[in-house]
Image (cartoon, rainbow, N blue to C red):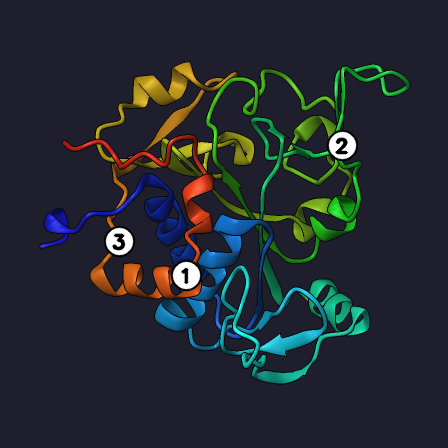
Amino acid sequence: MNEAIDYSLAELMIVASARLWRDDGEVLATGIGTGPRLAAGLARLAYNPGLMLTDGEAYLVENPVPLGPRDSTYRVAASGWMTYERVFDCVWHGRRHALVMPTQIDRFGQANISCLGSDYAKPKTQLLGARGFPGNSINHANSFFVAGHSTRTFVAGEVDMVCSVGYNPAREIEGMRAFTDLRAVVTDLCVMDFGGPDHAVRVRSLHPGVSFEEVQAATGFPLIAADDIGTTAPPSAEDLRIVRALDPHNLRAAILRDNPAPRRV
């Protein structure tokens, strides 16, 4: 039945990301960016009713806030305040699973959003800066949403600036592994986890029509495939109904260039 449903590749990525929160229980689901935010909202409504969200400003919510302009009569259905103090309580007590969008990521999950180029004084490209990535990458779960799977994002060696903690054995401090919890990477080609040797990136599922060889060619470091690697499960009709209701202005269409559909097998 799912084969007859029309959906975009961006919607496949959003639904695959939402399923990452399925077994988390009562935690704060944080999605940074259009795709991750829609994924968090879908997860709350379809996969894990124990999740809590924020409205992106000051409120803690159970009902996801739709993206984009809203009618003047719309009011956020708040369940409480979500001050910085409460955010940090969730972070430091491990009660959050964040889905973020790195500019670079390496074999061991170290991520960069700060700058491109090894000369920090004069980088090739200046990005956001490390911002909250260092502290936000420990003590709770993190996953990644990558809209353009290429060797420029999945880099050989180490990212140009390590902004978030990963599993790199060369940088491991005694006891640090207990505070690191990287779960998954959802890209426009596949879904990956950190189940490889020394917690290296491993391919869990391939999107329809994508081969493992294609994913490897777009990755700057060697990959391994999970023993039970399969095809990424498609969205259900209910998944799509929820995502489209949460994004009435179709902002998700801009996640990927030309808003492609998944390949057909």
Tell me: residue 175, above or below residue 73: above
Q: Are the two marked residues, 3 and 1, in contact with CB atoms closer than 8 angstroms?
A: no
Residue 265: image tag: none
Residue type, numbered disc 2: Ser
Foreground: 79 or 132? Answer: 79
Q: Are the two marked residues, 2 and 1, in contact with CB atoms closer than 8 angstroms?
A: no
Q: Which residue is mark 3?
A: 235
Could you tell me which residue is drawn at 58 percent across and 41 percent down? 101
Position of residue 80 measured from the top left corner of the image (x, y, whole percent):
67, 84
> Marks 3/2: CA distance?
33 Å
Q: Is residue 23 visible?
A: no
In the displayed image of the protein, which residue is found farthest to the front? 72
Position of residue 158 measured from the top left corner of the image (x, y, whole percent):
67, 21
Residue type, numbered disc 1: Pro
For label 1, count other residues whose C-alpha is less than 10 Å away and answer few (under 14), some (14-19) or many (20+). some
Foreground: 199 or 39? Answer: 39
For label 3, count other residues whose C-alpha is less than 10 Å away and answer few (under 14), some (14-19) or many (20+). many
In the displayed image of the protein, which residue is found farthest to the right? 121
Quarter of the figure that contains the N terminus:
bottom left
Quarter of the figure that contains the C terminus:
top left
Could you tell me which residue is drawn at 52 percent across and 73 percent down? 71
Position of residue 211 measured from the top left corner of the image (x, y, whole percent):
26, 23
Tell me: residue 204, above or below residue 83: above
Is residue 202 shown left or right of residue 67?
left
Could you tell me which residue is drawn at 31 percent across and 17 percent down? 213
Tell me: residue 114, above or below residue 52: above
Task: Label 1: state its secondary structure.
Answer: loop
Foreground: 262 or 135? Answer: 262
Q: Which residue is mark 2?
A: 114
Tell me: residue 82, above or below residue 18: below
Q: Which residue is mark 1?
A: 248
